Amino acid sequence: MTRLIFLGSGSAFTVGANNFQSNMLVVTEQNHKLLIDCGTDIRFSLHAAGLSYRDITDIYISHLHSDHVGGLEYIAFSSLFDPRCKKPHLYLSKDVSSNLWDRTLSGGLRSLDGDIANLDTFFEEHKVDRQGYFMWQNIRFNLVRVIHVNNGFYLMPSYGLFFTLEGVKIFLSTDTQLCFDRNGDIYEQADIIFHDCETSLYQTPVHANYEQLTELPEKIKNKMWLYGYQPGLLPDAKKDGFCGFVECGQVFEFSSSHSQELKVGFEA
């Protein structure tokens, strides 16, 4: 049995809502763990799940906002100075990789006592080609380019994942605007979709919002779980045709004979 665990299901600035940023774990039957994104909340969300940096050996990074990379310094230093740990493996697109060290991590990680560090000091990096994939525990994770932030000159590199667990095809959007016109074939192919969903009264243009998602075809909504939402009262997603809103700590279990969803009860 393979599990997908939502360490948190909230938006970037979730606070005081018994929730954390939307970072997830894929856990195999042999208890190998792949962390999908590593935000600033990660030391708290791991602790709430009974885990720590010692459990994190493999990490995928979708893009460079702090709710997806802000916890890498914690993982990096904690692993480096703990002799029980090996370097974590880091999987990411080449265009995300090119900015990760110089523009995101080097300010805090570059200086060590008696040495100057680089990304290789802390992580075993695996760069993924354009329209490429990476293999982890015999699972193929295809990167899906999504539109998150368009600054008018270029798209900020941001990638969802399309992968199969025990025969179930999964699309995990990470942070994205609604890209159904661009990636409709991925939405169609997936058996389950986990989709970024903004629920704020003051909406931003860089995330799919709930009202937009309600306009999707019923057959798409019927297999879609919503996450990445803001604290507060949520719409009735099931009434509107969705599977529901993912809760903090929710676990989705997959086996060769069936798949099912199971909620577990750790608290933020």
Image (tube, grey):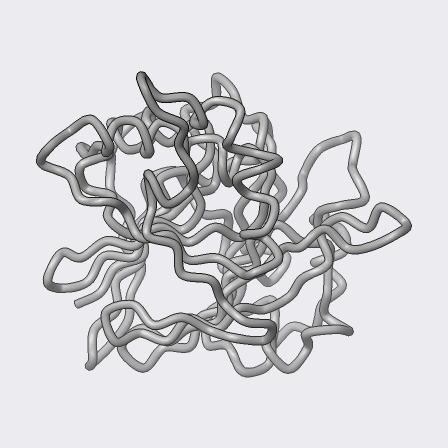
In the displayed structure, 6 sits above or below 83; it is below
Please identify the quarter of the rendering in which residue 167 is found.
bottom left
Which residue corresponds to the image point at 18% horizontal and 37% vertical from the top-left? 54
Q: Nearer the viewer, residue 194 or 158?
A: 158
In the displayed structure, 235 sits above or below 154; it is above
In the displayed structure, 114 sits above or below 215; it is above
In the image: residue 98, left or right of residue 22: right
In the image: residue 242, left or right of residue 137: right
Residue 44: horizontal and vertical position, in percent?
A: 33, 24
Residue 244: horizontal and vertical position, in percent?
A: 50, 53
Q: Nearer the viewer, residue 75 or 252?
A: 75
Which residue corresponds to the image point at 23% horizontal and 69% vertical from the top-left? 137
Residue 38: horizontal and vertical position, in percent?
A: 42, 39
Q: Nearer the viewer, residue 168 or 39?
A: 39
Which residue corresponds to the image point at 10% horizontal and 62% vertical from the top-left? 30
Please identify the quarter of the rendering in which residue 157 is found.
bottom right
